[in-house]
Image: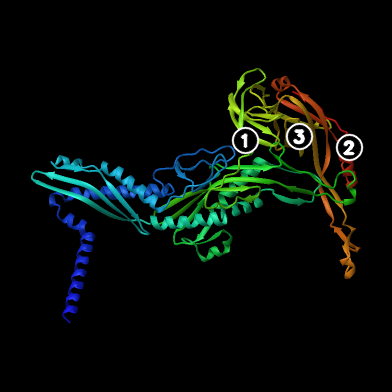
Amino acid sequence: MNKKAQLTIFIIVAILIVGIVAGYFALRNVILKQEIPASMEPIYTTFLSCIEEDLLTGIDILESQGGYIELPEFEAGSRYMPFSSQLDFLGNPIPYWYYVSGNNIQKEQVPTKTEMQNQIANFVETKIQNCRFDNYYEQGFEIIIGQPNAKVTIKNQEVTINLNMNLNIERNEESVLVKNHKVITSSNLGKLYDTAIKIYNKEQKELFLENYGIDILRLYAPVDGVEITCSPKTWSADKVFNKLEEAIESNTQALKTKSGSYTLTDEKNKYFILDIDTEAEVRFINSKKWPNGFDVAPTDDNVLIAKPVGNQEGLGILGFCYVPYHFVYNVKYPVLAQISLGEEIFQFPMAVVIQGNKPRKALEVEAVGVKVPELCKYKNTLTTVKTYDTELNEIYSEISYECFGTKCDIGKSPLQENFPQCINGYILAKSEGFQNTKYLHSTTEEASVNIIMNKLYEKEIQLNLGGKEYSRDAIITFKSDVSSKTIVFPSQKTIELAEGQYEIQVYIYRNSSIKLAETTKQQCIEVPQEGIMGIFGLTKEKCFDITTPSQIVSNALYGGGTEKYYILESELINTEKIEINADALAPPTTIEQLQQNYILFDEKGLDIYFK
């Protein structure tokens, strides 16, 4: 019994000791604070206010910059990938959590909570030494501060900082030394960061932003389709891209999560609701003013053209015309995710990449780079390249080298760089205001190359039909060995040309009312016979009736022609416009007459005048 009583006493004493120690550590700042003389209490209160102010400032900067106070090293984008490593949002640089570098490498820079805690601690350590005590110096106080050492802890609804730093206050015969300081401030940083990670992981796993982007692409741009018409379908690439920019901006902002302002009325717009449960308010932002990239193929000098099928010679048995089209897009743009609770906003950007009408591949644990062509890895032939205009004035241009379909970027001329070895490759020169130039050159030995580039001149087009000025629909193309340029007249009336040999084509279209009746024709195919005979490969003929509905051809070829013409630079320098005279064709009333017009078109010439 005595042993049990002694054991009970020891347990009670141990509990008391633990409680005293825990209480000391929990209340030590209060104890220390209570030991501060009353006359020095305002100074210490000011010091704690400085800590809290610096802590809140650090949190605010970190939330506005995607979890960073000290930004990662900046990496510029390129003409292939428009993203740098940071998004400029209202003058505030925010590091991308995911982006594709200028040399086509997928990269992540997502901060951990530990890294954020360390950055806030470093920020407070730097700023606290600027705490001002001027009023107290005037009162005769001597205040000496030591070197700071801070530790920050981020929780869901608060951020705590423990600052180990000597604060020595003296006046007359009174003095006090405080070493440890603790400040707790209310903040949703932890919650906001956890929600940001949840959104980012969902994007990397499901690529929901890319999938929304593809839906926008197919809704607002010509991608795949077939239209019943006998005239070509044309789109301006610039207008398509402008429409896509506006659509991406507005549709991205419509995205929401099941949180914040989500209500039952939003059920009508389920398409825009992301399956992410969070109490925070989440917004997704895009601006057409931010860096982005749009390209599409095939194009003819910035014009998308789909040509009709069914009006060519020998296809009259179809009894109708149709225009099939398929365009392939590469689209790149940033999206900024903003997560808010109360007045606090945590934001981070991500790059959205659509390649070949498809979303990029989801990023694995480690970033995977796009493989550099084998040819471009081995550059060992020193070559000097300079580019000039036709008057031998040196110009600056972007130089690349192409060999058997593989193109390697070299740099900007004038340059002296190593080129990959190749026989009968091409040096490609590109400069604003000049025609892209290809120069045949074998890089088997060291050499110096001078390239002459033709200047581009913008000219107005005047189109005449049958001797009278024409201002209705037409497609005008200038084809050369170097390039092909097309304008859709009259919405486009100017074109940029350089000296050279061109084949000029003009297709003029007018409204028509050719009515094609419904037709039925029989299609027969060989199918396997039923039963045991089919096993031995025996077949039989099976026929189907294929019905083509009636249609009205609303546009038909009405005039035009083709002409080969060598354009001199002197003609481009000394004139303002190009006048093209074309002949009219008989208005077609049947599909046969329409096909006949296409045959006659090849025999029609054009009269070309520079004025």
Can residue 178 be seen? Answer: yes
What amino acid type is highlighted by mark number 3?
Answer: Thr
Distance CA(mark 3)–CA(mark 1): 35 Å
Kindly identify the residue that appears in the image at 60 percent across and 43 percent down.
371
**Image depth: mark 3 or mark 1 in front:** 1
Considering only vertical position in the picture, is 489 above or below 107? above
Relative side of 503 to 373, left or right: right
Single out the residue that lies furthest toward the bottom. 1
In terms of secondary structure, where does tag 2 sit?
A: helix
Location of mark 3 (residue): 477
What amino acid type is highlighted by mark number 2?
Answer: Leu
Relative side of 332 to 457, left or right: left
Q: Identify the mark nearer the N-term, 2 or 1.
A: 1
Distance CA(mark 2)–CA(mark 3): 18 Å
Q: Around disc 2, counting alpha carbons within 10 Å, would you say few (fewer than 14), some (14 to 19), or many (20 or more)? A: some
The numbered disc on residue 600 is 2
Location of mark 1 (residue): 376
- Nearer to the camera, 441 or 113: 441
Q: Around disc 1, counting alpha carbons within 10 Å, would you say few (fewer than 14), some (14 to 19), or many (20 or more)? A: some
Distance CA(mark 2)–CA(mark 1): 49 Å
Single out the residue that lies furthest toward the top. 391
Kindly identify the residue that appears in the image at 33 percent across and 45 percent down.
123
In terms of secondary structure, where does tag 1 sit?
A: helix
Q: Quadrant of residue 409?
A: top right
Q: Report x, y in % for residue 84.
A: 51, 40
| Whether label 3 touches label 1, CB < 8 Å | no
- Nearer to the camera, 446 or 169: 446
Image quarter (top left, top right, bottom left or bottom right) of the C terminus: top right
